Image: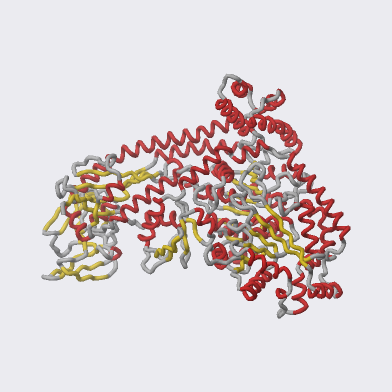
Amino acid sequence: MPFTLGQRWISDTEHELGLGTVVAVDARTVTLMFPASEENRVYSRNDAPVTRVMFNVGDVVDSHEGWSLKVEEVVEDKGVFTYLGTRTDTEEPGVALREIMLSHQIRFNKPQDKLFAGQIDRMDRFALRFRALKNQYQQHRSPLRGLCGMRAGLIPHQLYIAREVGRRYAPRVLLADEVGLGKTIEAGMIIHQQVLSGRAERVLIVVPETLQHQWLVEMMRRFNLHFSIFDEERCVEAFADAHNPFDTAQYVLCSLDFLRKSRRRFEQVVEADWDLLVVDEAHHLEWSEEKPSRQYQVVEALAEKTPGVLLLTATPEQLGRESHFARLRLLDPDRFFEFETFIEEERQYAPVADAVASLLSGNKLSNEEKNAIGELLSEQDVEPLLRIIEASDVAEEQRAATRQELVEHLMDRHGTGRVLFRNTRGGVKGFPNRHLNLYPLTIPSQYQTAMKVAGMMGGATGAEEKALQMLYPEDIYQQFEGDSATWWNFDPRVDWLISHLQANRQEKVLVICARAQTALTLEQALREREGIRATVFHEGMSIIERDKAAAYFADEEGGAQVLLCSEIGSEGRNFQFSNQLVMFDLPMNPDLLEQRIGRLDRIGQRRDIEIHVPHLENTSQATLVRWYNEGLNAFEETCPTGRSVFDAIQGELIELLGKGGNDLDALESMIERSAEMHNHLKAKLDQGRDRLLEMHSNGGDDAQALAKEIEALDGDTDLVTFALGLFDTIGLNQDDRGDNAMVVTPSEHMMVPSYPGLPYEGCTITFDRDTALSREDMHFVSWEHPMIQGGIDLLLSEGVGTTAVSLLKNKALPAGTLLLELIYTIEAQAPKQSGIGRFLPQKPVRILLDGKGGNLSANVEFEGFNRQLSPVNRHLGSKLVNSVQKEIHSLITVGDKAIEAELAQAKEESIQEMKQSLGEELDRLQALKAVNPNIRDDELEQLEEQMKALTGYINSAQVQLDSLRLIVVSHN
């Protein structure tokens, strides 16, 4: 097209310049002025990288004076356009707008406008955009959303609980699995689902102070949820940004003691609006009707104001039924209003568990068991099922299916089945055995002398401080000999450790000690004395440094043989690729002992755990070893009674430890009483086991099927292909490291300054779950990872791939044949928390039209068709577009009519699916409420309101053209 003064053009390479005006033309060059950016450009007339701006009938265009015109006619005079139409502000008809008077800031947002303005993207980006839309739609619709992307093994009972609770509106439950069964992971999966669905935007986690870092790491490492730890220092800093410091972060983690000690912070945290409250170690919340503890009152005030509440405890009834009732009361005070009523209900449910055990074992039910079932289920529900179960002429398969159906009815109606989930090691398979190996060693004279001197000088002041001091003689020696003292040259535990490592060179060995300094000293000893490859892991290191240490330990080839951990430094980490645990010293708290063993003894561990305990004879160390082993059997079995027994004999134990282990008679007596108490409490806990509740909590066959379904989605090659294309398009560097690993780093040519989910220094990623579980320094990338979700959002918001021009080399079709590929999106504008994403998230609809307007999309699949196409450069693409503008407009009109039918169908299908899904849930809950008062009224009301609101949102859904591609048949 020839250049003429006054014409408007747009730069193909510098879109930000705005609309340009031809101000000078000579034989070789053309000069364009860009008033919006106050820039001039001089181009060669023959290959100027600019595209003519032309508007068509039906477009609305802006004048530089600020008013707009709806174009009804386009007149061309000597190469310059005049647009005739109606002013949109005054509705004045017959208004003329010469193109030189067009607004200089016109932006081309519609894909067809961009196409006509020469803003043509690469073909691969068009394909990537369509895949992004399609995958985003599938992820939102998936019933497994929020369960697939966590860095954790696919443990059936965890997945089952997380799915059951995570999809509820404002869930209020008590997670009470035994130690090592993964309550933190269950809570994280529930939080993740609630966040992704929009039901929880602000989350508060309240934990004991010692567990803050563990929770911080677990949420970040496993779920990519970045919580902020709030203490007094953080609150003071936040005061500059908000009157209430708790309003400055979406995801907050703080200690219960912090809120208990400061009335001001307590009042502020209660004033802040939270969607979900999570409280760990809830068994410490002591309560009585007359005098609830301060901790209980803090949590009670938060629970009253927060819609969703998760309480976590490993010991639901360990502190007594009254304490158990108190925790349930936090979840639903209207339901659990009186302790005596609760006890009576519990009594009624107890016989049902025995009946269920008989059902599952295939035994014939006694009359008492039938009566117990009849008290929970109506006669018309029970009788037909019992007849089938007891009929001799019915096939065993049918009887087994009927027994299972009856059990499921009972679980649904069980008293606490909606608010309490409890799994025990006895009911869940997959745990290793533990083997204890004790190594009594002679105390060296240097320690004897140091401890004697410490005793003569008075030593520690408090009894507990003295007891702790006697457990760590190296500290006493260091204190008297000075910093230059080298206790590791004579401590027999160090000699033993070196010998053990040399004898087990093929094994990865985890060594845990109470203090970071001990770990550092041991690393030096192993390195200097024997050159053993070791790495240290303690609370003084940054998270990145810990990651590197963990990765060095996990590396099978050339990595460290031994990882030396401090007590706190090991929290929240999983080293179950090792089965060798050395306790260089012992903690005085049984919970910490269990936590140490729990680093290796976890569900999914494939080998038995070897626990090695070197200790000095006739010292406090030997006393503590015997008490743990003989009094609690805490090394070889999990010990749910440990804390209760410890609290009962704490004073006596501290006194014995302070004496250095010399009073054997007192020790024997204490061990005997501890063992008796332990066995009594253990038997009581076992009697109180609610097997019906456990069966409900582990999910049975449903849980197994759920785990297999998620496992089948792992290793999705579409994800890998999409991610690599996404990273390429955004401009990220990718370095393949082999072994399912890749390093991704920012580049200097990125589309945006920073990429979502990618650290400034880059990171190592893997798409393989097993690799991610064995290498905690790697990011596990799934469809749910921020690098994918954020990348898709970035791709769509930046307008990448909205236009393209391609060639189809096909001699069966006439050269020059046109095809137009239109990608529409159907979208309902609705709050995220409404649940719209489950039924009608943004839905892409592809329409492929031939030159005559025939719709080929049903017969021509996208990926196969895309592989037959070839890209064209932008300059040739612009020429092709300009030559067939009228045809493209006509085809878009055909596409707009075709999409209306798709829109109507999508609305109808979405409403039908929504009413069926939510309606069935509402009917089930209403029926259950008659027999199980744990169904809350607000759950029913919310479902009814949700159905009504969603109907309105879906009916208001609209459609828009998202992207388009012109395809031209070529024989070359």
Q: Position of residue 572 (x, y in %)?
A: 61, 58
Q: Does residue 147 appear anywhere in the picture?
A: yes
Residue at 84% x, 51% y: name it: 673
Residue at 50% x, 35% y: name it: 918
Q: Quadrant of the C terminus?
A: bottom left
Protein image colouring: secondary structure
Residue nearest the observer in this picture, 294 or 531: 531
Residue at 79% x, 69% y: name it: 443
Residue nearest the observer in this picture, 429 or 337: 429
Q: How many numbered tags mark residues here? A: 0
Q: Position of residue 550 (x, y in %)?
A: 57, 63
Residue at 73% x, 44% y: name it: 317
Q: Position of residue 59 (x, y in %)?
A: 25, 50
Q: Position of residue 663 (x, y in %)?
A: 87, 62
Q: Does residue 264 appear anywhere in the picture?
A: no
Question: Can you tell which quarter of the image residue 373 is in?
Answer: top right
Q: Residue furthest right?
A: 665
Give the answer, above or below, for where 281 lies relative to 746: above
Q: Quadrant of the N terminus?
A: bottom left
Residue nearest the observer in this picture, 329 or 217: 217
Left or right of 858? Residue 576 is right
Left or right of 120? Residue 189 is right
Question: Can you tell which quarter of the image residue 171 is in?
Answer: top right
Residue nearest the observer in this picture, 425 or 286: 425
